[in-house]
Image (cartoon, rainbow, N blue to C red):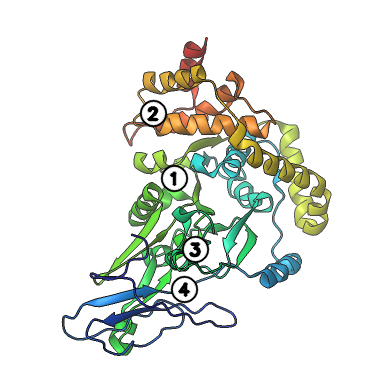
């Protein structure tokens, strides 16, 4: 159960406190023998400790972290955009159509499961991913919640929000853009998962939990640059969260769980090392990026980049119309996605391709169906065609063919050959 703390637990009295800039977050443990309610800890979850072996009753209040802004803060954030570091416009990216398509399909349908981008150095992988932030749609979240909880979907709600709903309280709701969180290579496990402050337990008699990057990335995008260089222990954390959709922190007999559903986007250079097959399989799609060989295109890329460096604001203004058009296209595709259908015959053929390619599990079948539907929605249609499937199936399956970690990822030729053999 989400948000469970401690070995023995039952829901008890919930208390709330607030600060002007951050929501105060507390968790209280009351002993069954009726001792005092204990201390509060601002900036985390406070749990009073007691000597002896008495039973504890717990209640969860708000968890403090970088919280979602209120409506007033949203306006301030919008007003301060001019002072933020300018982002290269997505519409200005030259070439790299495969990578851009995979990213757009994941924005339209986050359940595709993310994308792994592998390619040469200096091919614009990180620039393209970060330029996606301008196109991300808005989502409704509970104001002041640490986990970007959905006010209607219990699967992506933090423990405090679920408690409020059970008590029938009214939830303040705001709309914010989908969040993109960068996971640095040097991040510690505590920073990623969240941590319990044992020092507070020893000095003040409270155990305090501070959520990490996985909490912040809930219902958003988690981007890992040079993901093939990520430490194994962090890879294990990502595998666990990506598989279950929940992050569980276990420290000193305390267990805390919260939702962690995110679109996982990774990029890297295959020359620096390959990913473990288990992590590769967690990425819904795989995009290969190559160096542009056409001289005219290379000149255009250099000129555009020089223009952006010279005057970023003016450069972004010149692409505003294209950006707005693309954003409208994404919004329309997200709205009509649920109406897109795919014939049973085409589903069977997709599964035949996966079976004959000896793809382990059913994730390849599921992702291929979802990606084909998202592409049809992006193209403004309500029915998937063979062309849609042919476009996305190499990106959905080729990274799932590698059985041995020493093997290289197929370029997609095997998938394409099998596709035309089955769909002929």
Q: Which mark is residue 299?
A: none
Q: Badge 2 local density, few (<14 within 10 Å), some, or many (20+)?
A: many
How far apart are the alpha carbons under marks 1 and 2? 20 Å
Would you name the residue on which mark 1 appears?
Answer: 272
Residue 29: percent from left, percent from top: 31, 79
Asked if residue 291 can be seen in this view, the reply is no
Q: Badge 4 local density, few (<14 within 10 Å), some, or many (20+)?
A: many
How far apart are the alpha carbons under marks 1 and 3? 34 Å
User: Mark 4 near mark 1, Cβ–Cβ under 8 Å?
Assistant: no
Q: Nearer the viewer, mark 3 or mark 2?
A: 3
User: Mark 3 near mark 2, Cβ–Cβ under 8 Å?
Assistant: no
Q: Nearer the viewer, mark 2 or mark 4?
A: 4
Would you name the residue on which mark 2 appears?
Answer: 401
Q: Nearer the viewer, mark 1 or mark 2?
A: 2
- Quick one: label 1 or label 2, which is nearer the N terminus? 1
Residue 307: percent from left, percent from top: 79, 51
- Quick one: label 3 or label 2, which is nearer the N terminus? 3
Would you name the residue on which mark 4 appears?
Answer: 62
């Amino acid at each position: 159960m989400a948000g469970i703390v401690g070995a023995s637990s039952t829901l008890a009295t919930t208390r709330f406190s607030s600060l002007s800039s951050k929501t105060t977050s507390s968790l209280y443990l009351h002993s069954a023998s009726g001792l005092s309610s204990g201390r509060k800890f601002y900036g985390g979850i406070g749990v009073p400790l007691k000597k002896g072996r008495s039973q504890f009753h717990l209640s969860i209040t708000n968890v403090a972290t970088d919280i979602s802004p209120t409506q007033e803060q949203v306006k301030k954030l919008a007003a301060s955009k001019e002072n933020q570091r300018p982002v290269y416009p997505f519409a200005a990216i030259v070439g790299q159509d495969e990578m851009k398509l995979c990213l757009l399909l994941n924005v339209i349908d986050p359940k595709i499961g993310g994308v792994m981008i592998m390619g040469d150095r200096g091919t614009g992988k990180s620039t393209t991913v970060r330029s996606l932030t301008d196109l991300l749609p808005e989502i409704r979240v509970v104001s002041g919640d640490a986990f970007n909880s959905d006010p209607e979907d219990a699967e992506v709600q933090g423990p405090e929000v679920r408690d409020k709903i059970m008590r029938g309280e009214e939830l303040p709701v705001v709309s914010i853009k989908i969040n993109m969180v960068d996971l640095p290579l040097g991040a510690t496990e505590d920073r990623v998962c969240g941590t319990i402050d044992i020092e507070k337990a020893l000095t003040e008699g409270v155990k305090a939990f501070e959520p990490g990057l996985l909490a912040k990335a809930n219902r958003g995008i988690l981007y890992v640059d040079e993901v093939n260089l990520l430490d194994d222990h962090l890879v294990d954390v990502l595998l666990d969260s990506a598989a279950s959709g929940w992050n569980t922190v276990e420290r000193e007999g305390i267990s805390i769980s919260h939702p962690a559903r995110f679109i996982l986007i990774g990029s890297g250079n295959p020359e620096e090392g390959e990913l473990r097959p288990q992590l590769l399989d967690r990425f819904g799609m795989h995009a290969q990026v190559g160096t542009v060989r056409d001289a005219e295109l290379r000149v255009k890329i250099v000129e555009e980049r020089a223009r952006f460096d010279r005057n970023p604001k003016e450069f972004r203004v010149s692409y505003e119309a294209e950006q707005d058009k693309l954003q409208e296209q994404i919004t329309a595709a997200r709205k009509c996605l649920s109406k897109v259908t795919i014939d049973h015959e085409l589903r069977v053929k997709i599964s035949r391709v996966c079976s004959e390619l000896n793809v382990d599990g059913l994730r390849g079948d599921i992702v291929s169906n979802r990606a084909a539907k998202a592409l049809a929605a992006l193209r403004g249609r309500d029915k998937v065609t063979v062309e849609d499937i042919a476009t996305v199936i190499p990106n959905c399956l080729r990274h799932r063919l590698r059985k041995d970690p020493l093997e290289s990822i197929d370029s997609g030729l095997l998938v394409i050959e099998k596709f035309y053999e089955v769909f002929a």
